[in-house]
Amino acid sequence: MANQLIHRDPQRSLARFDPFSDMEEFMHDFFAPALRLREGGTSRMRVDISETEQAYQVQAEIPGVNKDDIKVSIDGDRVSISAELKEERVTRDGGGKAVRSEREYGQQYRSFVLPHEVDEAGAQARYENGVLLLDLPKRAGTGGKQLEIQ
């Protein structure tokens, strides 16, 4: 029997289940929320702020978020950005049957105080390729005054 040839029909071949084939992806998905908390609770939103004489420019990286799920509020010199993440991943086999389905929901939030108040009426926001771009003009007359000590 050891020398018999086994005929394999490609339509009826069996695939061996390997529970460790996606271990790297499983470990990343399993530990990602804990790693975000360990890093200070800041999820994936990264913010860069630059300043000119007239305005502040803010770039906030918020990948994987629909622009309708992003909210920006301005209160004087405080700017707050919140985004709701709704991500679903479905892996299908060749026949269209779902093999694995994963969902990730969460809230991202950043708030910061600028050195000058923002003119809310002139503020503009746009979302391009996962980056929120804010143009925040400075409110006139909020530079403060430094007193001379006599």
Image (spheres, rainbow, N blue to C red):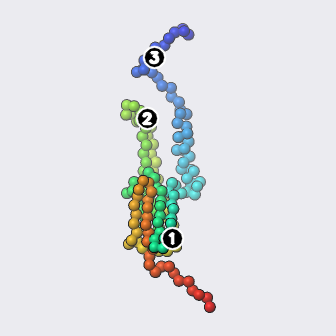
Residue at 56% x, 10% y: name it: 2
Q: Is residue 69 visible?
A: no
Residue 21, x across and y down, in percent: 53, 33
**Can the viewer see residue 34?**
yes
Depicted 71 relative to depicted 87: above or below: below
Q: Which residue is mark 3?
A: 8
Q: Is 72 left or right of 3, judged from the image as shown?
A: left
Task: Identify the residue under disc 1.
Answer: 114
Q: Residues within 10 Å of mark 1 (few under 14, many from 20)?
A: some
Which residue is most to the bottom? 150
- Tell me the residue at 52%/55% (across/down): 43
Distance between the Cα atoms at labels 3 and 2? 25 Å
Q: Secondary structure at mark 3?
A: loop
Amino acid type for the residue under numbered disc 2: Val
Residue 99 image label: 2
Q: Nearer the viewer, mark 3 or mark 2?
A: 3
- x, y (%) of residue 36? 55, 53
Q: Please, what is the three-letter code of the amino acid marked with disc 3?
A: Arg
Tell me how far mark 1 sits from mark 3, CA to CA. 70 Å
For label 3, count other residues whose C-alpha is less than 10 Å away and answer few (under 14), some (14-19) or many (20+). few
Earlier in the chain: of badge 2 and badge 1, it is: 2
Secondary structure type for disc 2: strand
Q: Residue furthest front?
A: 53
In the displayed structure, would residue 55 be above or below residue 92? below
Q: Position of residue 20 (x, y in %)?
A: 55, 33
Q: Secondary structure at mark 1?
A: loop
